[in-house]
Image (cartoon, rainbow, N blue to C red):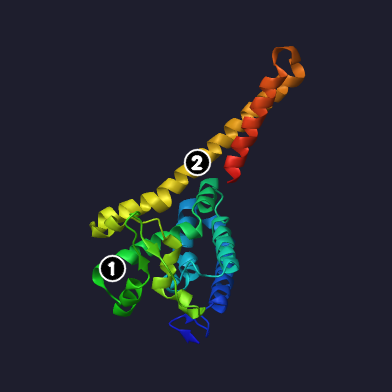
Amino acid sequence: MKVLGTTMDTTLTWNEHVNNAISNVQSKIHAVRMIQRFFTTDKILQLLKAYCYPSLNYASSVWLTPSLNSKLKSNLFLASGKILSTIEVDSYRNLHKIYMPEMWQNYKLTISLYDLTTTKLPHIDWQLLQGKILQNRRSTKLHFTSTNKLWCGLKILPNCFKTITNRINASWLKLTKETYIQNCKKEFITSPLQLYWFANVCFVFADVWFLTFIILKFFCVKRVHCNTFNIVLVFCWLFWLMYLV
């Protein structure tokens, strides 16, 4: 069933809608590439934002939920990457790799949570949410549960909040919306990005350290003690494991 450009099925898996959106975007990417040589990079970027991304993310507030199938998420991420691959600028592609879909989905859920608790609209969702919030005196974080065992029930808004459980302070809901948004950005976007860059720095540092001691080990054997080399090697592997995690 198709309603306002959104294809629905009986189980709300959104398979057909996502596949149609990706197919539509691929044809648009091909059209943009045919005229790409006549425009600057900035103009092409504006064209992609106005022409391709709206087709890919149309009505995403309805179907792009944390409970969406992981394969569909991966296909959407690849399609988004193909859009940016049209531009010959690495910074845009790197930005796309950093901002994972789950990060933005959880951030959008936090905004929905604030709107739902302050306006109590839709009233049905607000009533369902009251039975899914568990507050513990020992913890200041909000804990959410999902009780509906049906697959369709996992798609409703109160059940989606389970993916942000234990990440939002209960006191944040009493703040103004601007302050609440700033706190959520720090929790769901800024802090993960800082951790990402720190891991990259550690990885580069470990690589340089490892290569330096390899050179010293094989070309200046007398100057480097074997135990020292082994300790440094262990630290390099630890930094590498931190990067993978």
Q: Position of residue 28 (x, y in %)?
A: 55, 68
Dot 2 surroundings within 10 Å: few (below 14), some, or many (20 or more)? few
Q: Position of residue 112 (x, y in %)?
A: 34, 66
Which residue is depicted at the point 51% across and 50% down?
Answer: 98
Residue 197's label in the rendered image is: 2
Residue 73: quadrant of the picture: bottom right
| Nearer to us: label 2 or label 1 | 1
Label 1 amino acid?
Thr
Judged from the image, the secondary structure of the residue bearing numbered disc 1 is helix
Label 2 amino acid?
Trp
Q: Of the residues under marks 2 and 1, which one precedes in the sequence?
A: 1
Residue 222: quadrant of the picture: top right
Tell me if residue 239 comes above or below residue 189 in the rendering.
above
Which residue is depicted at the point 73% across and 20% down?
Answer: 217
Q: Is residue 214 left or right of residue 193?
A: right
Tell me if residue 56 comes above or below residue 231 in the rendering.
below
Residue 239: quadrant of the picture: top right
Instruction: Determine the CA span between mark 2 and mark 1.
Output: 34 Å
Q: Position of residue 164 (x, y in %)?
A: 42, 60
Which residue is depicted at the point 40% across and 55% down?
Answer: 167
Q: Position of residue 176 (x, y in %)?
A: 23, 57
Judging depth in this view, the residue of 156 and 23 nearest the camera is 156
Residue 157's label in the rendered image is: none
Judging depth in this view, the residue of 200 and 80 nearest the camera is 200
Q: Residue furthest top?
A: 222
**Residue that badge 1 annotates:** 117
